[in-house]
Image (tube, rainbow, N blue to C red):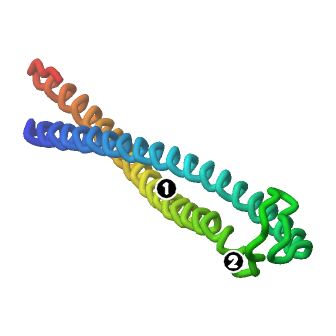
Amino acid sequence: MPTANISSKKACARRNKKKLDSDQASLKNLRQQLETIDKQVKEKQQAHDKALQDFEARKLLVHDFAVELRGMVKPGQQCPVCGHIIDKVLDNNEMQSLVAPYEQAVKKLEGELDALTSKYNKADAQARSEASRIEDQHNELAHAWSDLAVKLDQAIALGKQAGVNVEA
């Protein structure tokens, strides 16, 4: 059995091992990125949930309060809440403007959450693909090492038959 063939197989196996090590480091990096994005998504989800809860509470409070008060008061009367003289009774548009900043904050957080979720899903898919590719390479490398071991054993056996001391 030619030594060049065994050396070639060894070199190929070493290259595959280096590539596998590099791919595993790349996969580790992708997983770390995925964890970071997952943490960001959870933080944004919590911020979104809190903002939405605040928004809904204020919206309901403002709406209920405004409807009740607007029906009871007229300009020039004393406010039943604070005692000041009422200059103006807010119309529906003016009331909506009180809620608008909270509504905008919720929409902004929803957009950020959607973007992070998309980024997370993309990174997750990439990590899964990379893991599958690395597993395939690992199986290929294991098969190459197995073939090399068989060929080496055959070469050693042939060398012994020929009276040559051959070591792996």
Horizontal arrangement in the rendering, residue 167 relative to residue 137 (left or right)? left
As helix, strand or loop, the secondary structure at mark 1 comes to helix
Which amino acid type corresponds to the residue marked 2 in the rendered image? Answer: Glu
Residue 3 to residue 163: above or below: below
The residue shown at (9%, 36%) is 3
Task: Kindly indicate whether the residue at mark 1 contacts the one at mark 2 (C-beta within 8 angstroms).
Answer: no
Local packing at callout 2 (Cα closer than 10 Å; few below 14, some 14-19, many 20+) is few
Q: Position of residue 153 (x, y in %)?
A: 25, 29
As helix, strand or loop, the secondary structure at mark 2 comes to helix
The residue labelled by disc 2 is 94
Q: Position of residue 114 (x, y in %)?
A: 55, 64
Residue 162 to residue 74: above or below: above
Q: Which of the two labelled residues, at mark 2 and mark 1, occupies the earlier sequence position?
A: 2
* Quadrant position of residue 68: bottom right
Marks 2 and 1, how far apart in space?
Answer: 40 Å
Relative depth, front residue between 31 and 137: 31
The residue labelled by disc 1 is 120
Horizontal arrangement in the rendering, residue 71 relative to residue 2 (left or right)? right
Which amino acid type corresponds to the residue marked 1 in the rendered image? Answer: Tyr
Which image quarter is the C terminus in? top left
The residue shown at (51%, 62%) is 112
Q: Position of residue 104 (x, y in %)?
A: 59, 68
Relative depth, front residue between 36 and 4: 36
